[in-house]
Image (tube, helix red, strand yellow):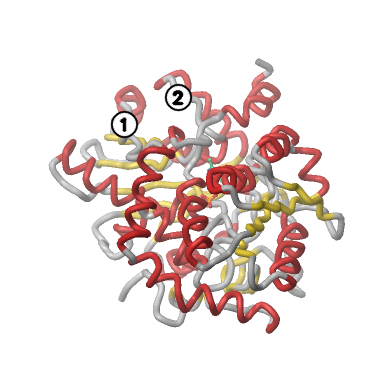
Amino acid sequence: MSYQVNEKGYYGDFGGAFIPEMLYPNVEELRSRYLDIMQEESFQKEFRQLLKDYVGRPTPLYYAKRFSEKYNTKVYLKREDLCHTGAHKVNNTIGQILMAKRLGKNRIIAETGAGQHGVATATVCALMGIECVVYMGEIDIKRQAPNVARMKMLGATVVPAISGSRTLKDATNEAIRDWINNPVNTHYIIGSVVGPHPYPDMVARFQSVISEEVKKQLQEKEGRENPDFVVACVGGGSNAAGIYYHYLDQEEVGIIAVEAAGEGVLTGKSAATSALGREGIIHGSKTLLMQTDDGQITEPYSISAGLDYPGVGPMHANLFRTGRGEFISITDTEAMAAGLELCKLEGIIPAIETAHALAIFETRKFREDDVVVVNLSGRGDKDLNTYIEHFNL
Ligand SMILES: *Cc1c(COP(=O)(O)O)cnc(C)c1O
């Protein structure tokens, strides 16, 4: 059995492409061509070159000595925080902008909640000189002013979504509407391993550069390619998919997924999808999803904007359902403490999303000789105000 996607676009029971008929030609064009394009030598050459010279890859695999001593196990941090723009998201947007060019598209659309994916998309559009329109909920535009400014500086047009709750899901609806109206010249860059097939698989493949590098780097440092565990926080699940990718079917490597419990899994203010979710369809794929008894999507909550998503990608739903992945949820308070601790122990200020992954060591014990690789998905500069408020700094 494989935990990779099958030819039909499913991970076990999850995935597929549940889309309005009007969107079919766009998605089908991508589905029928993405693998061939990604395998072209010229594509790989350009992708690898940009990852190296523009993004700054390979990112280091850093042995966190003081953190390891504290938790009495061997912890390595995969430093995605050192990528250009401060997180892993750019690995995917670089891949998708090259894909768009080969599909003959000259206009990019995207949706964004916290603004991080919008910034990563605006960045690569500037790099390529391609028009960029980012849909963002009106409320999120107010909450995330610095990222809105970044997108504008990078030349993107930010369009407010003014319907519904005026947050991420409304921005997604606007982006889909745009794509239906502009099927020929426009590519829709989705920012995580979510959406209709082939998006989850395509995004996972672009992010898989993370585990590809870990294998080489661990071989150098530990004399073996496989760690005992890989750990990542899961919003939609793209940084997690990246660090799991080459280990998915290597059952001796434990997979740990960390979700945001918000104020507590049972408080009604949480984003712990695996604990609370049931099967449903969101953004064109069948997955686990937080919903009411009559199937309305529940508004998620987390102190970290990047984990504030009511679903998980289909790969992760399947890792949960099959038991291949171990799922842990971490509260706001636990995450904030872990973020501050990494600052003091290692001199690294992590994103609050990432801090959730670091917080598991308080309760999840590992053996002394276990090698545990944590994906340090992003840096905490964007979160300074939240850190300041939380700790009265
Ligand atoms: C966006 C983001 C996440 C969550 O997204 P995934 O697709 O689950 O990776 C996690 N960490 C950081 C730093 C982010 O910016």
Q: Earlier in the sequence, mark 2 or mark 1?
A: 1
Badge 1 marks a residue whose secondary structure is strand
Residue at image point 49% right, 78% down: 13
User: Residue 36: x percent and y percent?
Assistant: 38, 72
Mark 2 neighbour class, 10 Å CA radius: few under 14, some 14 to 19, many 20 or more: some
Ligand 1 within 8 Å, label 2 CB: no
The residue identified by callout 1 is: 62
Residue 294 lies left or right of residue 119; in this view the side is right
Q: Is residue 198 above or below residue 340?
A: below
Mark pair 2, 1: CA separation: 11 Å
User: Residue 18: x percent and y percent?
Assistant: 62, 79
**Where does the C terminus fall, quadrant-wise?**
top right
Work out whether residue 325 or residue 193 is closer to the camera in this orientation and state it: 193
The residue identified by callout 2 is: 348
Residue 94 lies left or right of residue 1; in this view the side is right
Q: Is residue 54 above or below residue 26?
A: above
User: Residue 291: x percent and y percent?
Assistant: 70, 66
- Residue 77: which quarter of the image? top left
Residue at image point 79% right, 51% down: 159
Q: Are marks 2 and 1 in contact (CB under 8 Å)?
A: no
Work out whether residue 67 or residue 211 is closer to the camera in this orientation and state it: 211
Question: Callout 1, which amino acid?
Answer: Tyr
